[in-house]
Image (cartoon, rainbow, N blue to C red):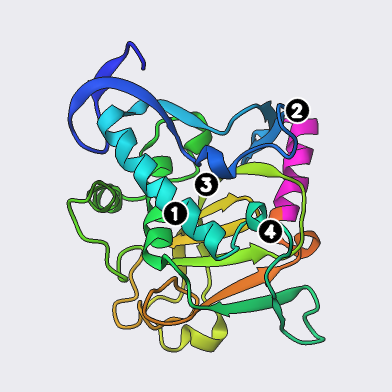
Amino acid sequence: MSDKVGVCALTGSEGSFVKAHILPRALTKPAKKDSHLLQSTRGRGYRKRFTSWYDKSLVIREGENILSRIDDRGVKALRKNMLVWSSWRAFKPYFEPMGVLFPDHSIRNINLEGADAIHEFFLSIAWRACASKMPDMEHAFASTEHIELMRQIVSGEVELKPINFPVSLTQISTFGEVHNFSPIRETVSPPKSISQYLENEEWDIIRIYMDGLVAHVHLQPERRTASEIPTFVSSSRKTAVTAVTFEASAQYERMLIGAWETKFPFGSLE
């Protein structure tokens, strides 16, 4: 427990701050026990750490207990559905190929066990990253209204519904370098196959990566189709989880950029 006293960003109660991990430790362990972990933030390159990011001025014990319960349920659901590398023990899940034209890409159409727990889990991480004042979280941001709604849902004040910050998933279908990457905000285009049915031509997302899994937390609701878009995590139907090999993934490309930024820090070539 910290000696620093303040107001919990999650519950609004006053008390002593505790360490709050942005990404849960269970899914951010180094490849070998007691070894360093590669950790990167956009524009900052790589750093060696023994644990992932934690904020010492975000929540008090009451708030951390809420986050811990969400993490426990979410991690169990991710492992149950074999969505993360650490759940691939004796074998890995089957990825259905997308054809000879796309040899590195595949898909899983699965009835997710604990879909609501997965939705809540990634929403809570998006809230932590956006609410944090840590420099490494500066690229994860949202409007004041969005952050407040996230907080209300995570704290249990507001019920989580499919329309609230829907989540889509992409698995990395082959093992790669174990590393952590800080959550960031991005703008992406929806798949052309469903774009004609959507309200938004572009999606603003919080991108989260851990343990071979990429999650997009969507900031704009798709009011008419939030529970129908196949790539959005849902408990009412099968969820289409897209997949790509590590070497062909955007995450691998980000690792290469991180290596460049480590070798040549911003401004060093001017």
Mark 2 highlights which residue?
A: 268
**Disc 2 versus disc 1: distance between alpha carbons?**
41 Å
**Disc 4 versus disc 3: distance between alpha carbons?**
24 Å
Residue at 60 percent across and 63 percent down: it is: 82
Report the magenta stretch's main SS. helix
Q: Which residues are magenta?
A: 252-266
**Disc 4 versus disc 1: distance between alpha carbons?**
17 Å
- The answer to whether residue 73 is above or below residue 240 is above
Location of residue 145 in the rendering, given as x and y in whole percent from the top left corner: 24, 52
Q: Quadrant of the N terminus?
A: top left
Q: Quadrant of the C terminus?
A: top right
Which kind of residue does numbered mark 4 sit on?
Trp
Magenta-colored stretch includes residue 39: no
**Tag in front: 4 or 1:** 4
Mark 1 highlights which residue?
A: 74
**Tag in front: 3 or 2:** 3
Q: Are marks 1 and 3 in contact (CB under 8 Å)?
A: no
